[in-house]
Image (spheres, helix red, strand yellow):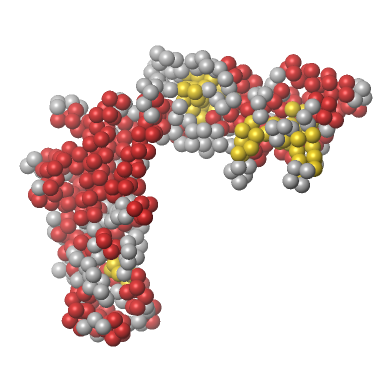
Amino acid sequence: MGSTFKSNDTPVSEILREIEQGKIQLPDFQRGWVWDDNRIKALIASISNSYPVGALMFLEYSEGGNILFKYRPFTGATASTAPEILVLDGQQRMTSIFNAMFSKQAVLTKTDKNKEIKRFYYLDIEHSLNSTIDRVDAIISVPEDKIVRSNFGRDVELDLSTRDQECANHMFPLNIVFDPIASQMWMNDYQKYYNYDPVILQKYAQFFAEVLVPIQSFKVPVISLNKDTPKEAVCQVFENVNTGGVSLTVFELITATFAADNFELRKDWERRYKNLIEKSALSFSNQKEAILSVVSSTDFLTAITLLDRYYIKINGGEAISCKKRDVLKLTLSKYKQYADELTEGFIQAASFLKEQRIFSARDLPYSTQLIPMAVIFTILKSKTQDSIIKGKISSWYWCGVFGEMYGGANETRYANDVGGMMEWINGGSEPDTVQRAYFQPTRLLTLQSRLSAAYKGVMALILKAGCLDFISGSPMDFTVFLDENTDIHHIFPRAYCESININKTKWNSIINKTPLFARTNRIIGGNAPSEYLKRIKVNNHVDSVNLDSYVASHMIDVQDLHTNNFDDYFIKRAKSLIDLISTAMLKPISNLSGDDVIAAFGRPLN
């Protein structure tokens, strides 16, 4: 089998002519042109100095080829023929070069403050030949009327609106640099304007040799993929050579593929994404924190592929798989068939997570686990309301969280878990994630920040167990979770722990933390537990019985707080958290009296 690509240095002049002719165009997944005025000048300066500007990547294209994309001409090009080449990497650079140095129209660009402007570009001949002046400072951009004004438009700083004015100011128009006839005529007019002054003739000859010739002969490395290149190879190669533009994701490739059938995938996804956020947010004003705000367009396509391949498998087809190459084979008909019910599957998954007391994207242990979960809810539909089935989904979910199974490359796990969950629900054995999940008791000590999935999981379980605010006794459900600025705080405050030299590994671990309303945490401050409990009783009129029951709802031995007994409190709460985790996973936690546990905690946890 021959190579899927070839590489060679290609003259920019040749590429620009083919862009103008429409032989070279863009696939429709490429975003709009976005480079600003200063970046265009910097690119021109690099070319005029013969500096490298990075490789381009082309895809040979034909209507009967392996990959069908919707295509469009470059900004500024007018040809409407079918392309022979699509630019996969280099759109920004080639659009900048084409518009500034080839097109006769003003370049639509923007300032560094993002304001749209139109510009023509010139080379200052005098400055170009001055070795003490940076080349980028010899490149001048002027407004569409070619007059630079100051003092709110009252004063003319530079007028290049006529050929004579260009000559008078020694300004060579860059949009003719690749046009040999126009360049020759401009040189003739320039020399004529100065009555063929030998100094001007010599200066222009130097400018031509040192500046124009390097531009006109400039070459760029071009990697060309042949038209039989598989779609997944196009995606992979792009990831390997992308020089900093918009990343070519699976979603971008599928968007361009579907566009060939006049289906606007991006618009369809944007509509669905808005729906996902609205249906999973706790309130209209807090949509940024909606659980499903973390679902990406590629996640959605991966889930559809997973769903499709599940149905193929149960009908006697090949194994479930949702790797990149599988997603890239997704057809428009399959997308249309499953997109609506999968959208509902994601929404049902978000509802399930709220029942698990995971209310926002910030508190979601693994966004990746949403992909198989949504597929499972889509397949099962209303059956997920069955308590036995919901219990199995819950066990699988918490095994994924506390077994910390969803932190790496997950496509194989997605496939195994979707198939495995359906088998388990139908009376078969447990899926791999449930079978292999294991929680090491000493892990509680290393859960120090909310960056960890297991840390977020423990907090959700404390909320789910029905913990109450220390002062109001309000349950911390989603109706008050955001309104009260609920967050995770120390039970034995940091300042107090540091004052009596308690080991930070213990006082800063999840064992010494719990969800509290913001105002409650302010009252606790840095005081010893016995002191802040007295303060709550006196200042907030909470009687002893109620206060003790509120505190106990966090799986805290209240007497240990009244006596500031950190060591006993810490062991008891560690045991309580382990019981919570075990119940959620529906699996016993082992090694509770192992040597490592005793060394870490000072005593066993059973």
Q: Is residue 217 above or below residue 398?
A: above
Q: Quadrant of residue 432?
A: top left
Q: Is 604 on the left or on the right of 117, as rendered?
A: left
- Total marks placed: 0
Residue 370 in the image: x percent, y percent?
27, 45
**Can you say which quadrant of the picture contains the C terminus?**
bottom left
Q: Is residue 491 above or below residue 35?
A: below
Q: Is 140 on the left or on the right of 315, as rendered?
A: right
Whether residue 35 is visible to the viewer of this picture, yes or no, is: yes
Q: Residue at x 12, y 47 (%)?
A: 385
Q: Nearer the viewer, residue 305 or 52?
A: 305
Q: Residue at x 52, y 38 (%)?
A: 244
Q: Quadrant of residue 134?
A: top right
Q: Residue at x 72, y 28 (%)?
A: 174
Q: Residue at x 61, y 31 (%)?
A: 96
Residue 167 in the image: x percent, y percent?
83, 28
Residue 210 in the image: x percent, y percent?
77, 28
Residue 49 in the image: x percent, y percent?
71, 33
Whether residue 556 is visible to the viewer of this picture, yes or no, is: no
Q: Nearer the viewer, residue 395 or 27?
A: 27
**Residue that sits furthest to the front in the current view:** 154
Q: Is 378 on the left or on the right of 482, as rendered?
A: left
Q: Nearer the viewer, residue 125 or 46?
A: 125
**Residue that sits furthest to the left in the current view:** 427
Q: Is 501 on the left or on the right of 430, as rendered?
A: right
